[in-house]
Amino acid sequence: MSLKTVLSITLIATALSVPSRHASAVDTDPSPPASGDYAEGRNAIEAKDWAQAIKLLTSAAQRDSRNADVQNLLGYAYRNSGQLDIAFKHYERALQINPRHRGAHEYVGEAYLMVGNLAKAEEHLAALKAGCPRVCEERDDLMRSIERYRARKK
């Protein structure tokens, strides 16, 4: 084997064995907060108990103010409780912490559709298209929401 071939194989093997920083940055924070409030807040969201979710996730955010997942879920809970102004602030915070947070891009895009701002929703769809791998539930969900929005406006 030539030196060039050995170096190429070594480079490829090294690249495949090192976890991609890009992949973890695209998803969510690698380690959600350990507080019980976060887990209980997620459960409240699943139960559609928006007031309880807001209370619990606010408590989790006070313990971990740099967690994009907590901010995103707070945005989601506020949006579903009809408090869109506060929801936008939490989505913005999530994206300040992690500009590639797929869930925040999806949910803020959906919130923009709720207030009739298709252009902003499409900006977040573009961010998802740029940052998602081939399979991307968040991108696909926002794309379908935009398609439904456009169909209603015709």
Image: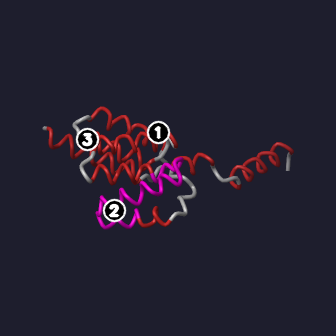
Majority secondary structure in the magenta region: helix
Give yes or no for residue 64 being in the magenta stretch.
yes
Relative to 49, 43 lies left or right: right
Give yes or no for contact between labels 3 and 1 (Cβ–Cβ under 8 Å): no
* Residue named by callout 1: 130
Mark 3 Cα-neighbour bin, 10 Å: few <14, some 14–19, many ≥20: many
Q: Residue at x 21, y 46 (%)?
A: 148
Relative to 150, 137 lies left or right: right
* Residue named by callout 3: 113
Question: Residue 130, relative to residue 62: is it above or below?
Answer: above
Q: Nearer the viewer, mark 3 or mark 1?
A: 3
Q: Could you tell me residue 17's position as x and y percent?
A: 71, 55
Q: Could you tell me residue 138's position as x and y percent?
A: 39, 51
What amino acid type is highlighted by mark number 1?
Ala
Lower sequence index among marks 2 and 3: 2
| Residue stretch rendered in magenta on the structure | 41-70
Question: Residue 40, relative to residue 79: is it above or below?
Answer: below
